[in-house]
């Protein structure tokens, strides 16, 4: 997923809550320009700041390694 795609998801989640960028910043403990940068896909954000923002929106990120492991184990199971 690209930063722009991630930003779109984050913006839609914020809008679904009816929050402004400023409210999202306050709730997440971030600065308004950080929220705006993430949503625009223009800010080089850290994993920590992205997870922090996602949490206040109620979004849970599944680490790629965990997802790949789950997908691989599903491929290697035998149906009963």
Image (cartoon, rainbow, N blue to C red):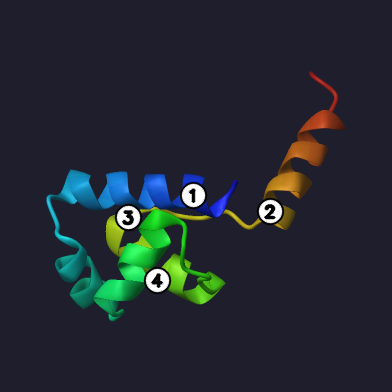
| Tag 2 secondary structure | helix
Percent x, y of residue 42:
46, 62
Residue 29 is drawn in which quadrant? bottom left
Picture disc at residue 52: 4
Percent x, y of residue 49:
44, 74
| Tag 3 secondary structure | loop
Q: Mark 3–mark 2 contact, CB under 8 Å?
A: no
Task: Looking at the image, tell me whether mark 1 or mark 2 is earlier in sequence order.
Answer: 1
| Tag 1 secondary structure | helix
Task: Looking at the image, tell me whether mark 3 or mark 2 is earlier in sequence order.
Answer: 3
Q: Mark 4–mark 2 contact, CB under 8 Å?
A: no
Residue for badge 3: 58
Rounded to the nearest angstrom, the CA distance separating label 3 from label 2 is 19 Å
Q: Closest to the observer: 22 or 78?
A: 22
Label 1: how many Cα within 10 Å (few below 14, some 14–19, many 20+): some
Q: Mark 1–mark 2 contact, CB under 8 Å?
A: no
Q: Closest to the observer: 23 or 77?
A: 23
Q: Is residue 36 left or right of residue 38?
A: left
Rounded to the nearest angstrom, the CA distance separating label 3 from label 1 is 20 Å
Residue for badge 1: 4
Residue at the image point whose x is 36% and y is 73% from the top? 34
Q: Is residue 38 left or right of residue 36?
A: right
Rounded to the nearest angstrom, the CA distance separating label 4 from label 2 is 17 Å
Residue for badge 2: 64
Q: Taking 8 as reference, is 22 above or below it?
A: below
Q: Residue placed farthest to the front in the image?
A: 42
Residue at the image point whose x is 60% and y is 46% from the top? 1
Q: Closest to the observer: 38 or 63?
A: 38
Label 3: how many Cα within 10 Å (few below 14, some 14–19, many 20+): few
Q: Is residue 76 left or right of residue 15?
A: right
């Amino acid at each position: 997923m690209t930063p722009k795609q991630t930003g779109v998801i984050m913006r839609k989640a914020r809008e679904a809550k009816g929050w402004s960028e400023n409210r999202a910043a306050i709730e997440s403990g971030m600065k308004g320009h950080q929220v705006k940068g993430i949503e625009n896909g223009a800010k080089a954000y850290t994993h920590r700041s992205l997870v922090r923002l996602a949490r206040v929106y109620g979004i849970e990120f599944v680490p790629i390694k965990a997802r790949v492991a789950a997908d691989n184990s599903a491929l290697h199971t035998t149906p009963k």
